[in-house]
Image (cartoon, rainbow, N blue to C red):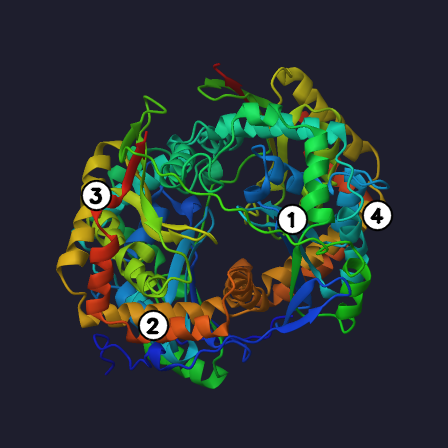
Amino acid sequence: MLNRKILPNIINPTDFKLGLKPYTHFKLDNGINVYAVEAGEQEVLMLELVFNAGNWFEEKNIVAATTNFLIKNGTKNKTALEINEHFDFYGAYLNRSCYSETATITLHSLSKHLHHLTPVISELLSECIFPENELSIYKQNQKQRLIVNLQKCDFIANRLIDEYVYGFHHPYGKYTSTIDYDALDRDGLIDFYSKYYLNGVCNIFIAGKLPIDYETILNNDFGKLPINSIDKEFKKIQTSTAAEKKYTIINDVNGVQSAVRIARQFPTKSHPDFQKSLILNNIFGGFFGSRLMKNIREDKGYTYGIHSYMQNHIHQCSWMISTECGREVAEPTINEVYKEMKVLQDTFVSDAELNLVRNYMIGSILGDLDGPFQIMSRWKSYILNNLTEAYFHNYINTIKTVSSEELQFLAKKYLNPDEFYELQVI
Amino acid sequence: MIQYKKFILDNGLRVLIHEDKSTPMAVVNVLYDVGARDEDPNKTGFAHLFEHLMFGGSINIPEYDQPLQMAGGENNAYTTNDLTNYYCQLPAENLETALWLESDRMLSLAFSKKSLDVQKKVVCEEFKEHYISKPYGDVWAKMRALSYQVHPYSWMTIGKELSHVENATIKDVKYFFQKHYCPLNAILVIAGNVETDKAITLANKWFGNIPSGELYKRNLPKEPQQTHAKLLEVKADVPLDALVKTWHMDSRLEKGYYVADIITEVLGGGGSSRLFQKLVKEKQLFSNLDCYHFGSIDKGLLAIEGKLVKGVSMQTAEAGINEELEKIKNELITETELEKVKNKTESVIAFEDMALMSRANSLAFYELLGDVSMMDTELEKFKNITTSDVKEYSKKIFSDNNSNTLKYYSNN
């Protein structure tokens, strides 16, 4: 007779040996670094070009993001429509994203079509003209999007908390108004494009089933560009945190929910506390079985979800707690968050809980590394942060060995309610 | 093509096993043949609320998540108008843990009052977060109710109103479980780094002795052919006017479904699509515009929705859409357009098949549709569609009488 009350034997994931499949590295003729991971069963690939062209480098608000967005909206010989038709025809996706330090152009396509697509990407990196008409449509539509977003309490909260933690004049803390869109002009984009794309700094990441001649394809289409000729140093920009710690904003008097954000500055990935703190964060609010979820969602039903996480940047990170909860329970929610911080400071995490989190995290990394794009994404994050493979093994080892004493020490060091910014937006 | 083996246990549970030795992981996916369409019109949102309760402990296991996390696993679930699907992924060595957990909650839940009380609140917060707090959040509640007279697609999976969720009782929960959550109404998929023989032995061990239950015979009211254009106009505290239109289309297994899928791509798929190019870029009537369908199993909806550029009248915006619909009804799309859409479909399928979880999910879904082997001929069905199929089907569905329109005006 089957005894359903007894858990079948499990193998502790902490006993697994985890590896990170290595990448191949080579340089194109112009010095661009290419990192490649060949893996996967499906005949697909991802090609990502990462430029040092994030908003860190802009002098006027939103210029970096606009240049990045409009990079596929017209070259000397092709209209925006012709460019879109080309990628759409091959069933490929060409996306672009702008972050604080970097801006990317990402291609997802069937492997067999790569050589049809790279010549047009190369054209985007050398012959963009930023047509006036495209810019004007962009301004109009982005402004409309912004005014809709400004009605959402979570959108407002995300902007403001970053401002408090980093300062409005820091790339991590600034945000956009409709006036910034109005102030955009074509010359500004052309100038930014010329400095940070045309003559910019670029790294290429490629993963998936790679065509046999992919190195030649990349070198032919990207190896002759004037990229990487000038070194672009990150200029130093200091954060300036807000003086006041607590904020309540009424964005909608009839609002039924409150967006709560609680955050503080936190060291970057290379700091010795960082990896250990990720385990503490998991216990605190990093997964479905975390203390915040168990207490505030699963016991009290105040919210659909509450999470804590490290907001990762290259120069400065923050530790953030984020939830949308019922307006009438916002105060109790905030109090419970602080209560959970105190518990972590005052009491050791039990062996049972710590073992569960160790197993969960290892299992989750194992699942995360399942697939070429995921492997590449981890490498990319290490490479852009100047970290090596040792960082990965150190992380795995830290998960397996961190002690409850160390976690309590970190809780005492970082989880002091008084040091957090607190915001609710209704 | 995805390789699999199909088994039927003595109690009627259908089991599909997909081996993939390239991954260290295993996925256990349990699909139940029940969705929001199977709800009582006065107790809507129940299938989804029930999904939450499935994590509140089962008859022999007080907590679902903890043992799974201990085994290095993660899980989640979703409810649609058609079905409810539960999935977990964990290191393949610990496959049995997932089967133990899933089988116990198929056997019986704990029916905890506390869990019901808390999850009602959680779902109400989910309702508020997505459908009340967000500008335009009520568009699809209104649009479904307008588009369907009798078919239960007339409400969203979250439910018609908060009170339906708030009023749920333990009695409702038990009744629903008994009716829908049993081997005869479920499909189990085991995928990943597993041996088929071992996997089926384990499936038998844990699921084999669960009572079959009764086969649920779905008998939903059929939506009658719509005979006149329907219009709803509302005013709300939103910054921009919005226009939403729907048309009834064929069910998942009819040919029209595949044609409709191609139509939505021609009209709204990507930067080179017709509606985006003409109405967002050239005429600048809309600041964003989407065209899509819901992928419904019963007769579904094809939708076009967008926000108007400030200063453009509703009438001009609607005329712009109509002009494009007239074109696709009266002129053949080009062979290049058709080829583009087919290339995209091929690419989408390849990307979807990358993730083990997504493969497991597809297997369960096609088995639910009638037979898992249909998955193999899916791409073929798209490839057989011609430009004249697109024209004829556009003529059929894009008629005024088959249309529903929501004009959502800004108060400002």
Closer mark to the observer between disc 3 and disc 1: 3
Closer mark to the observer between disc 3 and disc 2: 3
> Callout 4 environment at 10 Å: few (<14), some (14 to 19), or many (20+)?
few
CA separation in Å, label 3 and label 1: 41 Å
Task: Name the residue beneath numbered marker 4.
Answer: B336
Task: Name the residue beneath numbered marker 3.
Answer: A418
User: Which residue is painted at 69% across and 68% down in the image?
Assistant: A43
Task: Name the residue beneath numbered marker 2.
Answer: A398
Q: Secondary structure at mark 4?
A: helix
B133 relative to B388 in the view: left or right: left
**Chain under callout 3:** A
- Give above or below for B242 relative to A396: above
**Chain under callout 1:** A
Task: Name the residue beneath numbered marker 1.
Answer: A95
User: Which amino acid lies under the numbered mark 3 shown in the image of this protein?
Assistant: Asp
> Callout 1 environment at 10 Å: few (<14), some (14 to 19), or many (20+)?
some
User: Which amino acid lies under the numbered mark 4 shown in the image of this protein?
Assistant: Thr
User: Which residue is painted at 46% across and 42% down in the image?
Assistant: A172
**Chain under callout 4:** B
Q: Secondary structure at mark 1?
A: strand
- Give above or below for B9 relative to A30: below
